[in-house]
């Protein structure tokens, strides 16, 4: 029997997240059939690689932190069951805070006013994996999360 990560990003006006865990592979979907993106991730001995929609995910473990990119945005995550981090660049990025309690994970991406809350049932997955899935879904489905700021 495969394990599942499932829940919601953004409350009532948000998106469903549903991913199956098979060994070191996580595959599933964020959003619905029409407005959604496929998630394909693999946990390696050095980090996590994969894709969300057509965007790549490449994150490596470095000095106790997961650092890398989700599409065009930089990502830093710290912790296992209490996870903190940042997506994007300073000033225009998104703070990440999540807390695992048993098989439940709840968290916030961005500020309390402009951000998105998320709640996930993790199955046997650790909190950092659920947080990463939420961040990847957020990047894929929130247009403002994947916008790049260009200097003119």
Image (spheres, grey):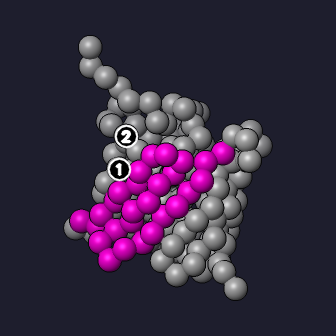
- 13 displayed left or right of 138: right
Q: Does residue 5 appear anywhere in the picture?
A: yes
Q: Quadrant of the C terminus?
A: top left
Residue 90 picture quarter: top left
Give the farthest residue toward the left.
Answer: 63
Residue at the image point whose x is 45% and y is 46% from the top: 55
Residue 77 — which label? none
Q: Is label 1 in contact with label 2 (beta carbons under 8 Å)? A: yes
Residue at the image point whose x is 46% and y is 36% from the top: 146
Of residues 8 and 81, the one nearer the viewer is: 8
Q: Is residue 3 magenta?
A: no
Rendered location of residue 114, percent (x, y): 56, 33
Q: Secondary structure at mark 2?
A: loop
Residue at the image point whose x is 54% and y is 32% from the top: 143
Rendered location of residue 151, percent (x, y): 27, 19
Q: Quadrant of the N terminus?
A: bottom right
Find disc 2 in the rendering and name its residue.
72
Find disc 1 in the rendering and name its residue.
69
Give the farthest residue toward the front.
Answer: 54
Query: Label 1 crowding class (10 Å Cα cut-off): few <14, some 14-19, many 20+?
Result: some
Instruction: Tell me: residue 79, above or below residue 116.
Output: below
Instruction: Tell me: residue 81, above or below residue 132.
Output: below
Rendered location of residue 137, percent (x, y): 57, 50
Of residues 86 and 134, the one nearer the viewer is: 134
Number of numbered discs: 2
- 143 displayed left or right of 29: left
Part of the protein shown in magenta: 36-62
Rendered location of residue 36, percent (x, y): 66, 45
What is the distance, in whole Å, between disc 1 and disc 2 at their CAs?
6 Å
Q: Does residue 101 appear anywhere in the picture?
A: no
């Amino acid at each position: 029997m495969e394990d599942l990560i499932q829940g919601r990003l953004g409350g009532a006006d948000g998106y469903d997240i549903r991913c199956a865990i098979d060994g070191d592979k996580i595959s599933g979907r964020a959003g619905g059939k029409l407005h959604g993106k496929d998630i394909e991730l693999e946990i390696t001995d050095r980090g996590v690689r994969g894709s969300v929609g057509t965007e790549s995910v490449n994150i490596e473990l470095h000095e106790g932190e997961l650092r890398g990119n989700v599409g065009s945005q930089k990502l830093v995550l710290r912790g296992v069951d209490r996870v903190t981090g940042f997506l994007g660049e300073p000033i225009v990025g998104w703070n990440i805070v999540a807390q695992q309690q048993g098989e439940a994970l709840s968290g916030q991406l961005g500020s309390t006013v402009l951000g998105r809350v998320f709640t996930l049932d993790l199955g046997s997955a650790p909190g950092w994996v659920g947080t990463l899935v939420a961040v990847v879904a957020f990047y894929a489905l929130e247009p403002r999360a994947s916008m790049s700021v260009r200097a003119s």
